[in-house]
């Protein structure tokens, strides 16, 4: 597992991600993969021989052996950094798009959504790495077709879900920056492949997928004028779809500096949309306290804590904690806003995960259907 | 020009080179010049002819140029672009060899750089029509070549000021700006802006080049929400843009207007009529009257135009100022310094603002107070906005 971690050191990620999209759709076609298993046989034997199988890949019953055996139906090709002299284009090592899609579904259905595999940080680590390898095969083979989109859609949903679920985990187990880098890459690749598709070729279900991901992109990158501009340039039918429209309203409220409206609209978001938005909610709450510290700034200010709690979408206790961290005085049931006392950077380390929208009990949701997009 | 033979053409080029006449020579390489329409020059293999008359490297450069005219005559812009990339390499090479100490060939560099960008544009459009090619690919590659040319100019420390290639910097920067704006990578403009800011030539370049430069920097400042700087640069650009360039003046105005409006200066109808920008007239009216309903209607009505220009999102920022104007009207109507919050809610509802309630009214007011548009505070206990007796709604121009 430490090997997987070293593969993800930040500097390397940044350097490597410079060429992470396949070349234009009608450029010279890439090599065609012929590997029909999730892991090329060569790699399987190699890793088995050197005891480098992940515990999710080990054949049941052989875990305690000196050299555990690989379970062929559970071994998945791992990500390996391209290196000089290493030929990563051997067809027998490359999985064609149909196999890649099956691999992705296996990783989501059997690993990410598994009710028994623990801890989820390890599940994430494994799935993250294997999905990265799936994308690598797509790039080498220069795929842009429907399987590519289906794979990217699931990957984006997985990474979004992970950003929410693992929020606050220790850095060595989950690095939000790395997750973010890959998420942005996948989103950008996915949206570009949508834009290359002619609108006449798009089916109804493909349209709804596009709407879903334009909305998620907008929410994840809340406040980005570039993303908002891109959405405004979409055809009207897509712009006025419920998800895109709602995402636009949230964006506009954010840009207009109306955090009350943002937090209110956020209650209408579905689970995955909340995952996309959640890292901005902290900013909104802070903004709200800032604005109110100025707007209500007076000597005998008495603003009910319970009212503030409703606006922030938190319970009274967490509201008090947030206020204390930002220098906002609470006296019993009242908040005494003061613009001179407000502190921008919180005094204490606030754990975002504690503030995660509380009526969004993640256990109620089926991970498998969330990531496969059928909930 | 449209009738000369290939030999006559090559002789003229040779003469221009011998006389070190940069501008004259540049004409023979520029697609703005009528010689490109001359079928006698549109050759697919002009190398031998060129070698007979010209010395290297001019022979190869001109040969590539003539191949390019051939491609353009056949409407093959992808091929034209490829040829042009070859042409552009020569001024670069020459700068290091034959022209180390002088800059007479700068006009040549300008002409071929301009055509490179234009062909990259055309080639991409051609590919897009066929459903091929990624948007921005060719332009990015063209930008890389132009950057090399720029670096050659910027790093010229040898020659005295009159012979320095640094005089080429601004022209090339403007070409690069045009590409970066087109491919939406504005952040790449930053190092170029820094280069000019630190250059002692920055106010010595031709006015035309400076107007163009300030236009792009002003636009970038606008997109970065630095409205003070945007106003400064765009105003300069507008004022110094030659009166005969109506199209350019209009273009500058499209970006200057939203910036000025955000700073509280509304344009006159006269100005808008003169430049055929009446779309802004209704926006101006709505904002000054505090009429949110009209503003929303106008933005929707001219949406396509505003979105295409990229100013829709900026104009939406005028909403805050419109709120301010609306609430000022409420204050003037009620003639009191302690206004019930309900009054503002009623005003917003009259403007058909959707789903607004007293909580949002408080937030909007809090934001206006925070931004300095209202001097006062909200009293939650009394559900009132209490404003200062003196100048509770400071003039917009006084707030940054």
Image (spheres, coloured by chain):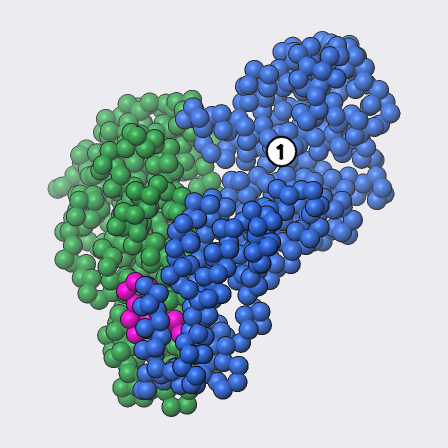
- Chain letter, colour blue in render: B
What residue is shown at x 32% (from left), y 73% (from top)?
B346
Residue found at x 48% / y 61%: B285
Residue B257 position, x and y percent, is 56, 55
According to the picture, the residue beneath numbered tag 1 turns out to be B145
Q: Is residue B285 a member of the stretch shown in magenta?
A: no
In reply to whether residue B356 is colored magenta, the answer given is yes
Q: Chain of mark 1?
A: B
User: What segment is highlighted magenta in the picture?
Assistant: B353-367
Question: In the rendered view, would you say B292 is above or below B80?
Answer: below
Quadrant of image for the C terminus of chain B? bottom right
Query: Could you tell me if residue A249 is visible in this image?
Result: yes
Q: Position of residue B85 (x, y in %)?
A: 62, 26
Percent x, y of residue B374: 47, 77
Q: From the viewer's perspective, is B159 left or right of B27?
A: right
Chain coloured green in this rendering: A
Q: Main secondary structure of the magenta part?
A: helix
**Residue at the far left in the pictured view:** A61
Q: Residue shown at 17%/44% (left/top)?
A: A374
Taking the image as shown, residue A63 lies to the left or right of residue A124, namely left
Q: Residues within 10 Å of mark 1 (few under 14, many from 20)?
A: many
Mark 1 lies on a secondary structure that is: helix
Q: Nearer the viewer, residue B367 or B248?
A: B248
Q: Which of A246/A3 is in front?
A: A246
Name the residue rendered at 57%, 50% in the picture: B273
Is residue A342 visible in the rendered image? The answer is: no
Q: Quadrant of the N terminus of chain B?
A: top right
Residue at the far bottom: name it: A300
């Amino acid at each position: 597992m430490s090997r997987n971690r070293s593969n993800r050191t930040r500097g390397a990620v940044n350097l490597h991600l410079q060429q992470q999209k396949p070349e234009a759709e009608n450029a010279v076609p890439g090599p065609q993969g012929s590997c029909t298993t999730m892991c090329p046989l060569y790699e399987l034997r190699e890793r088995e021989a050197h005891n480098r199988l992940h515990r999710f890949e080990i054949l049941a019953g052989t875990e305690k052996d000196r050299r555990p055996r690989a379970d062929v139906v559970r071994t998945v090709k791992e990500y390996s950094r391209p290196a000089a002299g290493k030929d990563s284009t051997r067809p027998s090592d490359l999985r064609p798009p149909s196999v890649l899609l099956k691999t992705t579904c296996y990783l989501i259905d059997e690993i990410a959504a598994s009710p028994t595999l623990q801890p989820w940080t390890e599940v994430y680590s494994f799935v993250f790495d294997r999905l990265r390898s799936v994308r690598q095969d797509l790039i080498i083979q220069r795929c842009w077709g429907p399987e590519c989109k289906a794979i990217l859609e699931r990957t984006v949903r997985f990474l979004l879900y992970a950003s929410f679920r693992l929020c606050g985990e220790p850095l060595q187990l989950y690095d939000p920056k790395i997750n973010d880098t890959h998420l942005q890459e996948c989103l950008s690749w996915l949206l570009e492949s949508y834009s290359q598709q002619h609108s006449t070729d798009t089916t109804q279900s493909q349209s709804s997928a596009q709407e879903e991901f334009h909305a998620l992109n907008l929410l994840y990158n809340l406040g980005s004028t570039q993303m908002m501009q891109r959405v405004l340039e979409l055809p009207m039918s897509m712009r006025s779809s419920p998800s895109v429209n709602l995402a636009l309203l949230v964006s506009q409220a954010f840009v207009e500096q109306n955090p009350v409206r943002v937090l209110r609209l956020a209650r209408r978001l579905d689970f995955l949309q909340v995952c996309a938005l959640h890292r901005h909610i902290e900013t909104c709450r802070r903004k709200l306290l800032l604005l109110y510290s100025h707007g209500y700034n007076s000597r005998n200010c008495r603003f009910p804590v319970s009212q503030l709690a409703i606006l922030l979408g938190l319970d009274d206790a967490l509201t008090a904690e947030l206020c204390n961290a930002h220098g906002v005085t609470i006296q019993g049931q009242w908040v005494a806003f003061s613009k001179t006392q407000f502190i921008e950077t919180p005094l204490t380390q606030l754990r975002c995960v504690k503030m995660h929208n509380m009526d969004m009990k993640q256990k109620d949701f089926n991970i498998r259907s969330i990531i496969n997009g059928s909930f | 020009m449209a009738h000369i033979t290939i030999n006559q053409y090559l002789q003229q080029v040779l003469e221009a080179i011998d006389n070190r006449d940069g501008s004259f020579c540049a004409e023979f390489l520029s697609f703005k010049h009528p010689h490109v329409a001359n079928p006698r020059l549109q050759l697919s293999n002009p190398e031998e002819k060129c070698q007979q008359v010209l010395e290297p490297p001019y022979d190869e450069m001109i040969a590539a140029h003539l191949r390019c005219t051939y491609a353009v005559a056949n409407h093959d812009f992808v091929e034209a672009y490829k040829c042009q990339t070859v042409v552009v390499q020569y001024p670069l090479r020459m700068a290091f060899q034959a022209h180390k100490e002088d800059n007479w060939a700068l006009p040549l560099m300008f002409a071929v750089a301009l055509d490179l960008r234009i062909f990259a544009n055309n080639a991409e459009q051609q590919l897009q029509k066929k459903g091929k090619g990624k948007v921005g690919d060719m332009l990015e590659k063209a930008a890389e070549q132009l950057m090399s040319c720029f670096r050659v100019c910027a790093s010229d420390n040898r020659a005295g000021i009159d012979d320095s290639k640094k005089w080429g910097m601004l022209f090339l920067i403007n070409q690069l700006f045009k590409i970066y704006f087109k491919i939406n990578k504005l952040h790449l403009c930053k190092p170029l802006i820094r280069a000019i800011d630190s250059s002692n030539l920055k106010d010595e370049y031709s006015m035309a080049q400076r107007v163009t430069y300030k236009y792009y920097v002003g636009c970038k400042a606008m997109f970065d929400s630095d409205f003070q700087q945007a106003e400064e640069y765009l105003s300069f650009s507008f004022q110094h843009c030659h009166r005969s360039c109506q199209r350019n003046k209009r273009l500058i105005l499209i970006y200057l207007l939203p910036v000025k409006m955000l700073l509280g200066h509304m344009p006159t109808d006269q100005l808008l009529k003169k430049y055929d920008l009446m779309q802004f007239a209704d926006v101006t009216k709505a904002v000054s009257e505090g009429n949110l309903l009209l503003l929303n209607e106008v933005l929707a009505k001219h949406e396509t135009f505003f979105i295409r220009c990229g100013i829709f999102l900026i104009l939406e920022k005028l909403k805050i100022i419109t709120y301010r104007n609306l609430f000022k009207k409420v204050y003037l109507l009620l003639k009191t310094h302690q206004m019930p919050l309900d009054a503002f809610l009623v005003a917003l509802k009259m403007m058909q603002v959707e789903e607004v309630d007293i909580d949002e009214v408080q937030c909007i007011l809090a934001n206006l107070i925070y931004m300095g548009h209202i001097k006062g505070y909200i009293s939650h206990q009394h559900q009132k906005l209490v404003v200062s007796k003196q100048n509770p709604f400071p003039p917009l121009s006084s707030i940054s």
